[in-house]
Amino acid sequence: MISRLFGSLRGRLIVLTVIVEIVMISAILWNSQRLAETHLLHQFELRRGEASRLMRAALAPAMAQHDFAAVAEILRDAQQLQGMTYLVMFDEEDRRIASASAMELPGESTLAFLQALPADENRMDFHIAMQIDERQYGELLIGLDLHFLNKARSEILTQNIVLALLGILLTTAVLAAIALWLTRHLTALSGASQLLASGSRLKPLPGAGNDDIGRLVGAFNSMAAALHARMEELEAAELTQRELAERLLYMAERDPLTGLANRARFEAELERVIGHIQRGPEHYGALLYFDIDEFKTINDTFGHRAGDNVLLHAASAISKLVRSDELLARLGGDEFVILAPGADRAAAQTLAERIVNAVRGLTFDFSGRRLGLTISLGIALFPEHGERGENVVSHADAAMYQAKAGGKNCWRIYRPELDDSEQMLHQLGWNDRIQRALDEQRLVLHFQGVHSTTTGTIAHYEALVRMIDPENPDQLLMPGSFIPAAEKSGRIIDIDRWVIRDAIRTLASANAPRALAINVSARSFDEPGLAALISATLAAFHVEPRRLLIELTETAALANIRDSEQFIHEIRALGCTVCLDDFGVGFSSFAYLKQLSADILKIDGMFIRNLPNDPNDQVFVRAIVEVARGLGKKTVAEFVGDAATLSILRDLGVDYAQGYHLSRPEPEISPL
């Protein structure tokens, strides 16, 4: 039979065809199975890759914003997709923050979770790093079910065996149709993912349904919408932050009252401009430094609102005269500068004259009184007057004070021969010594008796401050050495506070005097809490207020009579005695005694030193005594140097006397 079959051409063709068919079917079957396996693995990897990209795109922004509720919601949605056994999210500190699974998932860290996870050959485990740019915000662990892959292998093998008998073409057509149907939306998803990654806005993709691919399309649409919403929020936040940064930069360089450049902006620009002068002689300029004359008086008399109004109008008027390449800045208070690069001496003088005239033309209505405004302006040229910014500013400031010395309401170019910088350095030296004395407790009190002119007994003591020189501890400095410097620098307020406390402490000591007088400077009148400080210190040391006498100089009291009257009223309300020191320096001050309700008048030493030999001095002293008696006040004569002076004072009716003839200042109080 076999020989017959092979003996004929038909048989041979049949056998050959059968053999070829068997070979072809076997080859097709093997190749089909190989292709199916490769296809399934490829689809699986595509699916896993797409899932990884989608999950990273959906979850990374939420992780960056610590929106863990959104993370949990996305995981729940993703877990519903077929093949997701579990999804577990850990943050950048390896803490478990969200999960989605049909089974119980132990472990709160990555290592603990992986150790507790049972092995399963039908499951593939992998992780996705939640990363934006180069920063990682967490890690997502995913378990994919492989049952569908193994099942697909078996089904395809069976189908290949059956379909191979029907022909290679039919099998190929069916497989091609199935592949086309299965992947019809994956291509669209892939393209959309690339567009989304590039930042493009997408319309919702068609094809959302209840099957796996349809749900994936729906999840992708939701993710894209959420991502676009967050991108819009980030863009809005970025815009807000940019506007805020620009506003902060503006505020950092601007004076809040006038809107002019502030000190920081001026110093930066001055440094830049000064840096150019080293490039050659063609680089030069001018600095105009000015302030408003009597501005403090306006501020103190009419209030800060009036002062601010003056500054605003002055700044507005001056800014109209400044060119675009020049800088007008307010340094603080009533001090202004104009930095004019490229301005020579003539241009600076012209600008200064225009500014002085412009301000001179301003008038203001203060409480019904119409007052004018003037400025004093100094000019420093660079590099003529300095090649460093601090030198130029210092010389322009010195020129401004030269203008003030010239009568104010004018301008001056810096003149080195009129510069009082050495005196200013001397003042700075005293400032340092005074501060060291305060810090190192180098102030001491000496006490001089104030005697009754009739009995000679000490009625009370006056506390006189001395300074142990910080640079020479063996030297004791008298008040005339350091008090003027302290008054200029404002440290006199600290000295006054120290004297008040130490004097009251002395009154509370075992060998305390009956009463003690202290001097308070005019600068302390502006301190609204001084009376309260005295009251609190008296209470702290349990000292009766009547034992403390407060001495104010007549000239200081009359210079600021409103504050003096208020201060005297507060001190007398405490129960302290008020003495008007150096009385008679301005004899017209008799008229102010009705307002200054002092208890004791201390007659100035100018009337006492030559009292026995000068009848005019005796007339003045007699007049002061009579006025004091008429007003119910006591009198004290200072600088009593001999017995003849004391005798005349007794005859004139002076109540108390003080001077070297009676007692000298001592560091300790002698027992009464």
Image (cartoon, rainbow, N blue to C red):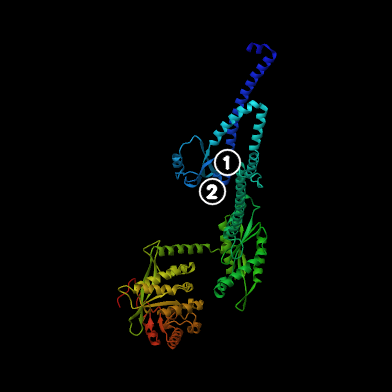
Q: Earlier in the sequence, mark 1 or mark 2?
A: 1
Q: Amino acid at mark 2?
A: Val
Q: Which of these two is toward me, 663 or 233?
A: 233
Q: Amino acid at mark 1?
A: Ala
Identify the secondary structure beneath mark 2.
helix
Number of numbered callouts drawn: 2
- Give x and y (percent) for residue 601: 43, 82
Q: Is residue 644 above or below residue 493?
A: below
Q: Quadrant of residue 46?
A: top right
Q: Is residue 122 above or below residue 525?
A: above
Label 1 sits on residue: 51
The quarter of the image holding the C terminus is bottom left
Identify the secondary structure beneath mark 1.
helix
What residue is drawn where x is 67% and y is 11%?
7
Report the residue that reaches farthest toward the front: 1
Q: Quadrant of residue 356?
A: bottom right
Q: Which of these two is toward me, 337 or 306?
A: 306
The answer to whether residue 367 is visible is yes
Label 2 sits on residue: 71
What residue is drawn where x is 61% and y is 25%?
29
What residue is drawn where x is 66% and y is 56%?
342
**Within 10 Å of the Cα at label 2, are there few (<14), some (14-19), or many (20+) other Cα atoms?**
many
- Give x and y (percent) for residue 245: 59, 56
